[in-house]
Amino acid sequence: MAARIGVVVFPGTNCEHDVVQAVERLGGRGELLWHGDTGIGSVDAVVLPGGFAHGDYLRPGALARFSPIMDAVTRFARAGGPVIGICNGFQVLTEAGLLPGALQKNGRLRFLCQPTRLEVTSTASVLTGLAEVGQELVIPINHFSGSFTCDEQTLHQLRDGDRIVLRYLDNPNGSVDDIAGIANEAGNVVGLMPHPERASHALLGSEDGLVLLRSLLSAAATGVAA
Amino acid sequence: MRFQARVEVQLRPGIADPEGATIERALPALGFEGVDHMRAGRSFSFEVDAPDEAAARTRATELADRLLANPVIEESTLELEALGG
């Protein structure tokens, strides 16, 4: 049975088809989920993809967290289901309180759209389970508000809990501790600013995102959080 | 009673404010010398129906904390004014 990956579509989301295509290329089944629905059906994992949910009005993710589907996504996450937030999806997860910290405007107020070099720094998550610590990946970013910030105590918790899963090798946006992606305590909820689905085919310039998506499919198929 | 509320949202002290810093850097070129500590923020205004000012303050504060500001990086201040009629 192919793992079923639910991909949430908010008004303004624009990376949902890219995620579905990348997932299906790896043998999974992608299913679009509308933000106005109150359930997520019987998917094995949920992806909140990139874009500009609700126009990014107020703050990126601030309004999306109140979309009807988010109650079901939160319940699924609390029950250990794999939930990934990519870029705007990461912003939604922090606003929803499913991940700590916040994504601020980039350090030099530049919209950044470029490949970035990343290092896998923890495999204790549903997104990095099949990767190796120290593995270098080239995956593009595409954001204006991607500078991860949090208080000192949260940063210690992230470090001590092995929850910083990806770091930038050339920090492009001023993120605290070069953070590109983090996980929750259980490792089943992960947010990252880089777009693995845009590094999922040689034609796109990199296939380095595949190991992350494969990890997600594997976690979804076994139904076990990291 | 009806109240006019004005909420100002600013980044917490210590949180980097690239927008404020960029504005500040532009000032000398415009001839504004001796201006510093520029911080950018946002302001929201709305009207609230409530039995009294305390109740209006509670509702408006909750609204500001739950939605208008992200408490992780921002703080808000509230001004209330009773509207006539």
Image: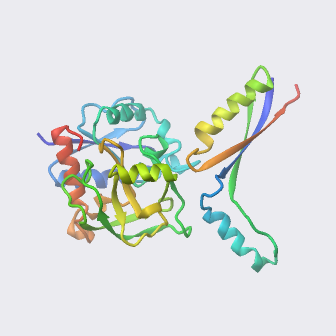
* Percent position of residue B76, x then y: 68, 44
Is residue B49 something that shows in the picture? no
Q: Which residue appears at 21% of the width and 69% of the height?
A: A202
Residue B15, quarter of the rendered image: bottom right
* Percent position of residue A106, x then y: 52, 64
User: How many marks do you count on the picture?
Assistant: 0
Whether residue A24 sits left or right of residue B8 in the image: it is: left
In-front residue for pair A40/A185: A185
User: Which residue in the rendered view is the most extreme toward the right?
Assistant: B84
| Quadrant housing the C terminus of chain A | top left
In-front residue for pair A187/A190: A187
Image colouring: rainbow
User: Which residue in the rendered view is the most extreme toward the left?
Assistant: A1
In-front residue for pair A64/A193: A193
Considering only vertical position in the picture, is B79 above or below A141? above
Q: Which residue appears at 32% of the width and 67% of the height?
A: A118
Whether residue A113 sits left or right of residue A121 in the image: it is: right
Considering only vertical position in the picture, is A187 above or below B1? below
Whether residue A14 sits left or right of residue B6 in the image: it is: left
Considering only vertical position in the picture, is A125 above or below B19? above
* Percent position of residue A1, x then y: 11, 39
Residue A9, quarter of the rendered image: top left
* Percent position of residue B36, x then y: 76, 68
Is residue A151 something that shows in the picture? yes
